[in-house]
Image (tube, helix red, strand yellow):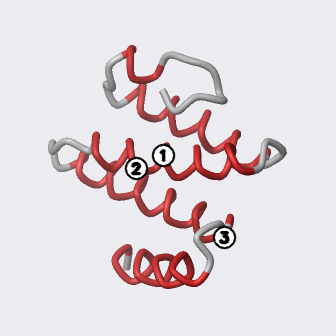
Amino acid sequence: MLDGAGKSFDIALKIDPLDTEALMGMAKVARRRAELKEREQASGEADWDLALELLDRITRDNPRAMRAFYNKACYKQIRRRTGAPDEVISGNLGSSG
């Protein structure tokens, strides 16, 4: 299911690399992959990094993208609870870190 969604968002991003909804969708897919890996005691760090990078792309291009800022804050909180190092999470909402 996640693979199908990821492929659909990837197609949309090839057509329009700045498609906010596709970037949000890809970030959500990456977040879900990270959570699934962590449930299986595997590292989800690369997926968390991707999810936050995708949200950063949105907020960099559109500083009024409140839903992306909100999701970024939520993802960082979820990541913190799953044991991500503090130095990865520190910083303000406008940074990737």
Q: Amino acid at mark 2?
A: Leu
Q: Residue at x 51, y 59 (%)?
A: 28
Label 1, residues with CA under 10 Å away: few <14, some 14-19, many ≥20: some
For the residue pair 69 and 35, the one nearer the viewer reads as 69
Q: Are marks 2 and 1 in contact (CB under 8 Å)?
A: yes
Residue on which disc 3 sits: 19
Residues at marks 1 and 3, CA–CA distance in whole angstroms: 15 Å
**Picture quarter with the N terminus:** bottom left
**What type is the residue that disc 3 sits on?**
Asp
Residue bearing the label numbered 1: 53
Crowd around label 2: few <14 · some 14–19 · many ≥20 (10 Å): some
Residue 5 at what x, y percent from top left? 45, 78
Q: CA distance from mark 2 to mark 1?
A: 5 Å
- Give the mark nearest the N terminus, 1 or 3: 3
Please determine whether, in this image, residue 3 is positioned above or below residue 69. below
Q: Mark 1 touching mark 3, by CB under 8 A?
A: no
- Residue 50 numbered mark, or none: 2
Residue at 52 percent across and 39 percent down: it is: 75
Q: Secondary structure at mark 3?
A: loop
